[in-house]
Amino acid sequence: MKKKIVSTLLATGLLTTAGTAVAGGKDCKNGHFGQHKGGMRIYKKLDLNKDQKQQIKAIFKAMRPDHKSDEFKKRQEHMQARKEVIQSDTLDEVALNDLAEKMAEKVKQRFIQRAKAEHEIWLLLTPEQREKLLEKQNKHREKMQDKFEKRMKKHTEKLDD
């Protein structure tokens, strides 16, 4: 029973995370998806020169979805189809699998796009900036790992009760 609950929670978390990735980012205070500056934040503390700042901004801007594009319309259609599958009286497994495959492809594309952008930015940085970036990334990774472990401990304690 506990394994089913944990599996369900993990699956829900993965779907939520993947859905956010398909939507282009996390929901910000202003209600717009993908409009946060989280990607740029880590680079701001690297003492970038004006040219580097402009080039990095251009890289991030090129990654942003255009709300007038077909991609944005497809995303809206996907979200509507997902809603219909979830809210129907019977679960259509075929439609659900189709949506999952489409979402997986989008997540893959977004991952590749992000990796290419990070590579472009890496090439813009000086050796000192690269070293500083690696330190910041490692510190952030440790912080996130600690948060994750605390969260998992909290959830497992709830399941044991």
Image (cartoon, rainbow, N blue to C red):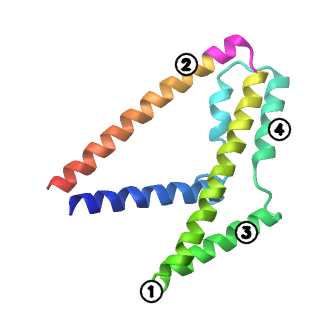
Give residue 58's mark. Answer: 4
Q: Secondary structure at mark 2?
A: helix
From the image, tell me which residue sits under label 1: 90
Foreground mark, 1 or 3? 1
- Label 4's element? helix
Range drawn in magenta: 125-131
- Distance from label 1 to label 2 (Cα)? 50 Å
The structure residue drawn at horizontal position 62% and vertical position 30%, both measured from the top left corner, is 42
Earlier-in-chain disc, 4 versus 2: 4
**In which quadrant will I find the C terminus?**
bottom left
The location of residue 143, given as percent across then percent down, is 43, 31
Q: In the displayed structure, would residue 117 be above or below residue 123?
A: below
Give the amino acid at mark 4: Ala
User: Which callout, 3 or 2, points to the residue nearer the camera?
Assistant: 3
Q: Which residue is mark 3?
A: 74
Q: Could you tell which of marks 1 and 2 lies nearer the N-terminus?
A: 1
The answer to whether 16 appears left or right of 29 in the picture is left
The image quadrant of residue 137 is top right
Instruction: Say which of marks 1 and 2 sits in front.
Output: 1
Residue at image mark 2? 135
User: Where's residue 24, x and y in %?
Assistant: 66, 54
Is any part of residue 115 visible from this angle? yes
